[in-house]
Amino acid sequence: MAEHFHLNTPLLECLSMSKLVGTTVYLKMENSQPSGSFKIRGIGHLCQQLARQSKGVVCASGGNAGKAAAYAARKMGVPATIVVPSSSPQLVVQGLQDQGAKVKITGKVWDDANAEALRLAESEGLIFVPPFDHPLLWQGHASMVAEVAAALGPGVKPGAVLLSVGGGGLLCGVIQGLKDVGWMDVPIIAMETVGANCLNAAIKAGKVVTLDDITSEAKCLGAKTVCKQAFEYSQSSDLTIISELVTDQQALHAVQTFLDEERVLVEMACGASLAAVYSGLIRRLQEEGRLPTLLGPLLVIVCGGSSINMEQLTSLKHKLQS
């Protein structure tokens, strides 16, 4: 029995991005996890803690959380029910079924699917797997920072960490990881797309808010409300969290550039953070004095994503570039 379900993913130096930013860029390649994204760290950890002797797990997710829950459940030999909104591509549904999960399609957006997952957990006695809002998830995600610290070696720490925010699970996990290795002073650049900007909206409002709708094509960033812990971190004086937005077009451009330069296809949600480098946002933050001019190595979390293939990419291009 493996100690955990996630891999220690490669940390790669990226020369083309380093040139753009003017400092060494390291990519933490979470796209190479067995479920296609970083989610397996937290969800695997949560399932191991809570679901060993259970009747099964239930998770609401049109993407990576569902895939991670299905993967962990299959490895543990427990049944998984994944509730997805009708907006989920057939590719996602198929992928979940391939992992042996039962897929239930409910509602138009994630929030609808989540309500159904909670109902099933209650009525069928299943373990509810939240996609981003649980301390065990954050604890699991924190392992990626420990791996980075080990790979960089003593005395080397990032100048900043760049990541994408959906519901805030990755952000909370990375902060937990920074605490664990004593890197609390490292600024975090938290990226979202316009139209899936629940953290940025909360920071602007000074409180957690719920977006009316997800209008971005980065569907995997599509939580209408950020988790409370992520918002609280954004207000903490002990941390530097820089919240920024890019357009869907910029995120898509980043996905295409990353595919051309690194030969890796990631989804739009991941493109949001890559766009910070490709669109010149990091440079702008330096010019505005929000990041140091002499920036230490930039750590980019390539969170991955399973809901993309060439067909999806082509359809996104038609949608966004017409």
Image (cartoon, rainbow, N blue to C red):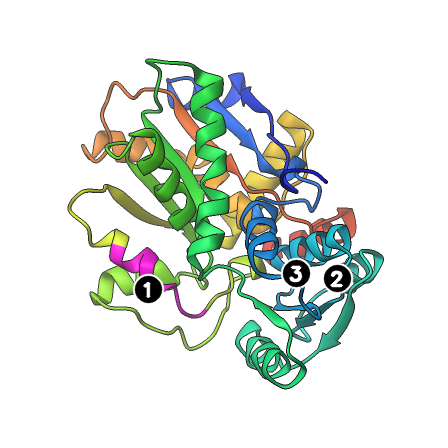
Residue holding disc 2: 78
Residue 231 in the magenta stretch? The answer is yes
Kindly check if marks 2 and 1 are in contact, taking CB atoms under 8 A apart as contact.
no
Residue holding disc 1: 228
Q: Nearer the viewer, residue 109 or 74?
A: 74
The vertical placement of 149 against 3, above or below, is above
Secondary structure type for disc 3: helix
Mark 2 or 1, nearer chain start? 2
**In the image, 178: left or right of 59?**
left
How dense is the environment of label 2, judged by Cα within 10 Å: few (below 14), some, or many (20 and up)? some
Question: Real-space Cα distance between discs 1 and 3?
Answer: 22 Å
Quarter occupied by residue 168:
bottom left
**In the image, 216: left or right of 101?**
left
* Disc 3 residue type (three-letter): Gly
Mark 1 or 3, nearer chain start? 3
* Disc 2 residue type (three-letter): Val
Quarter occupied by residue 174:
top left
* Disc 1 residue type (three-letter): Lys
Residue holding disc 3: 66
Magenta stretch in the rendered image: 224-232
Residue 126 in the magenta stretch? The answer is no
